[in-house]
């Protein structure tokens, strides 16, 4: 596969001043304001995504509507590549981390940027679960555990895409019986739509055998702009008074505990990094935040009344406000603790340590092994349906 290489642009900076006996110039100094203004973000080059993976054609879909938010979606992993949002000064800012080409998505160490993950997002203990008395064995690709669907998962396959209109793309994938160890032929449809002020993701899935399903989107966000530095000063509010503590391998213990009096209390807006170094065993296990929060019942609906409120994040520099709505019972908050600055982001940026956060709407991790958690079983004849809405700057 060909990769796209872009040579850095040389930028001239500074003026030469003449000295000597000449009289001072009366010409007004040049206005350098334009040189210091932020450059509005633009959507990626479609040509860099026209390739093949595993013999299947890949492409990039550009989404626009009458609003100011824009998005780029690729059918490789059904993933968000870019999400452009105006900042407090109206400058378009790319708040989603990603790569400039398909080749980079395939070959860089970080494979989850913007991806749809499944068949089971998050972790399953020791890669095993029982369903209707039968035990199933999955890949263990995260220490002793199964993570985000396995060694390949939905983020590393080519989906069939159809651009419905300027603001909507529909992607489908058949996960065959036995893929990554899961039972049943699972037909999945993910629809991205630019709604009023944001991006709405709708998921639907059906199966021909009983199986487990927990599909989510794994976009890494930085509301100051991808590659702009730490997210520790972003303000975060989670509509969650409880969370599911984990063991040292990040598998839930089965308990559901109150956030009150802990570094996990985001019921009021708090800087993400304000308590990151607290002497807390849970923070040590996750090397920071990498935990599932149990969303409160009775939350407010989104404007379309299709989902309910889960979180609000504010970019400390950009002033961009992102509100998250979902039909899911939980949300995984990940604070970028394992980012190392080794992946070349769009425009030559780097994915520095804690340079992004994820808010993955979901059922709880390891639910197939925890009967007290909301069930993730999908039976034949039923439809698994889920909606998540990332809405920007509307209050």
Image (spheres, helix red, strand yellow):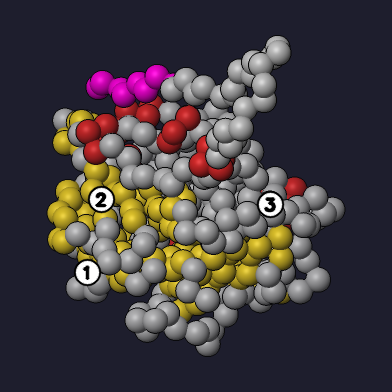
Q: Are marks 2 and 1 in contact (CB under 8 Å)?
A: no
Q: Residue at x 70, y 45 (%)?
A: 287
According to the picture, the residue beneath numbered tag 2 turns out to be 62
**Judging from the image, what secondary structure is the residue with disc 1 in?**
loop
User: Can you tell which mark lies on residue 2?
Assistant: none
Q: Which stretch did the figure color magenta? A: 1-8
Report whether 360 appears left or right of 277. left
Q: Give the numbered dot on residue 232.
A: 3
List the single residue furthest toward the bottom. 298
Residue 100 in view of the camera = yes
Residue 380, which numbered label?
1
Q: Is residue 4 magenta?
A: yes
Question: Which of marks 2 and 3 precedes in the sequence?
Answer: 2
Q: Decide which of tag 2 and tag 1 comes sooner along the chain.
A: 2
Measure the C-alpha gap from mark 2 to mark 1. Answer: 35 Å
Tell me how far mark 1 sits from mark 3, CA to CA.
44 Å
- Residue drawn at point x = 57 percent, y = 80 percent: 296
């Amino acid at each position: 596969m060909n990769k796209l290489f872009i040579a850095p642009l040389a930028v001239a900076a500074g003026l030469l001043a003449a000295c000597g006996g000449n009289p001072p110039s009366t010409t007004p100094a040049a206005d350098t304001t334009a040189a210091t203004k932020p450059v509005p973000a633009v959507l990626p080059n479609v040509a860099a995504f026209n390739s093949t993976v595993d013999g299947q054609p890949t492409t990039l879909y550009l989404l626009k509507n009458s609003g100011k938010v824009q998005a780029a979606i690729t059918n490789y992993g059904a993933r968000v590549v870019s999400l452009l949002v105006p900042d407090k000064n109206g400058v378009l800012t790319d708040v989603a981390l990603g790569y400039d080409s398909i080749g980079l998505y395939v070959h860089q160490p970080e494979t989850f940027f913007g991806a749809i993950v499944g068949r089971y997002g998050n972790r399953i203990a020791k890669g095993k679960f029982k369903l209707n008395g039968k035990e199933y064995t999955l890949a263990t690709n995260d220490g002793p555990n199964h993570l985000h669907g396995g060694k390949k998962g939905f983020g590393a396959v080519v989906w069939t895409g159809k651009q419905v209109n300027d603001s909507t793309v529909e992607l489908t994938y058949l996960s065959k019986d036995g893929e990554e160890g899961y039972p049943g032929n699972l037909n999945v449809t993910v629809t991205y739509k630019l709604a009023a002020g944001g991006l709405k993701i709708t998921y639907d899935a059906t199966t021909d055998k009983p199986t487990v399903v927990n599909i989510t989107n794994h976009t890494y966000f930085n509301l100051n702009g991808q590659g702009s530095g730490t997210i520790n000063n972003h303000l975060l509010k989670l509509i969650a008074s409880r969370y599911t503590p984990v063991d040292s391998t990040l598998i839930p213990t089965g308990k559901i505990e109150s956030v009150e009096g802990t570094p996990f209390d985001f019921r009021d807006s708090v800087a993400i990094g304000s308590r990151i170094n607290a002497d807390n065993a849970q923070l040590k296990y996750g090397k920071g935040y990498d935990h599932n929060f149990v969303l409160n019942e009775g939350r407010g609906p989104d404007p379309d009344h299709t989902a309910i409120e889960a979180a609000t994040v504010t970019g400390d520099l950009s002033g961009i406000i992102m509100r998250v709505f979902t039909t899911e019972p939980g949300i995984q908050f990940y604070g970028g603790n394992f980012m190392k600055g080794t992946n070349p982001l769009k425009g030559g940026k780097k994915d520095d340590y804690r340079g992004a956060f994820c808010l993955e709407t979901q059922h709880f991790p390891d639910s197939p092994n925890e009967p007290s958690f909301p069930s993730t079983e999908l039976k034949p004849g039923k439809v698994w349906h889920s909606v998540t809405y990332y809405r920007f700057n509307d209050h």
